[in-house]
């Protein structure tokens, strides 16, 4: 998945010598990402990176049991046709992560110092080949920052 800052503002650090160097806000985001499994049962963290204005990460939900994993992707309370994504387990995880980062950053930098873009981008990884391709993309993200379309986005 990918989670972006509001207006793609560069909040989390800089890319120097093709490596991501986190600032204090970036360290908060990384710390809160690493804490996800402690708050959400049957959730593990795989490859991830905190970039200047976004986070790429792979979350493993439900382990190897497909029926358990599928259950976590369905809405928590309702099985209606029109699915409210905010009730889905993955959405709850991202909502909790974003809230925690926002609270911690605003405590240090002020009430309006930080914000997230609404929602997030997700992709269900269905096989090992796809997983390995995504891991490689995440690892190489700092190498490609120079060519990123949001490279010229404002800084916080």
Image (cartoon, rainbow, N blue to C red):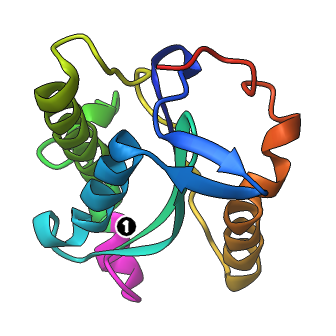
Nearest the viewer among 143 and 68 is 143
Front in this rendered view, residue 37 or 79: 37
Task: Indicate yes or no whether the magenta region holds residue 64.
Answer: yes
In the rendered image, which quarter is residue 132 located in?
bottom right
Which residue is pictured at 24% across the width and 40% down the height? 101
- Residue furthest to the bottom in view is 64
Residue 18: say if magenta.
no
In the image, residue 31 above or below residue 151: below
57 relative to 88 in the view: left or right:
right
Q: Examine the rendered structure and indicate whether residue 100 appears above or below residue 81.
A: below
* Residue corresponding to mark 1: 70
- Residue drawn at 22 percent across, 33 percent down: 105
Res 1 seen here: no
- At label 1, counting other C-alpha atoms closer than 10 Å, the crowd grade (few under 14, some 14-19, many 20 or more) is few
Where in the figure is residue 44, as x and y percent of width and height?
A: 33, 76
Question: What residue is rendered at 21% in x and 39% in y?
Answer: 87
As helix, strand or loop, the secondary structure at mark 1 comes to: helix
Image point (14%, 71%), residue name: 38
The quarter of the displayed image where residue 85 is located = top left
Residue 117 in picture, x, y percent from top left? 44, 21
Left or right: where 82 falls relative to 143:
left
Residue 60, image x, y percentages: 41, 73
Quarter of the image for residue 21 reads bottom right
Number of marks: 1
What segment is highlighted magenta in the picture?
Answer: 62-70
Q: Nearer the viewer, residue 72 or 49?
A: 49
User: Residue 113, image x and y in percent?
Assistant: 29, 17
Q: Is residue 144 visible?
A: yes
Q: Is residue 107 above or below residue 154?
A: below
């Amino acid at each position: 998945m990918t989670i972006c800052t509001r207006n793609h503002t560069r909040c989390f650090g800089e890319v120097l010598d093709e490596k991501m160097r986190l600032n204090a806000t970036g360290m908060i985001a990384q710390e809160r990402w690493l804490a996800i499994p402690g708050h959400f049962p049957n959730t593990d963290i795989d490859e991830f990176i905190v970039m200047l204005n976004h986070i790429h990460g792979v979350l493993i939900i439900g382990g190897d049991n497909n029926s358990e994993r599928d259950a976590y992707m369905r809405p928590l309370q309702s099985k209606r046709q029109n699915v409210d994504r905010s009730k889905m387990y993955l959405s709850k995880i991202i909502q909790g992560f974003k809230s925690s980062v926002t609270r911690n950053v605003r405590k240090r930098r002020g009430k309006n110092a930080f914000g997230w873009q609404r929602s997030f981008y997700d992709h269900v990884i269905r096989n090992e080949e796809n997983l390995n391709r995504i891991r490689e993309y995440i690892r190489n993200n700092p190498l490609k920052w120079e060519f990123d379309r949001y490279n010229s986005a404002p800084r916080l």
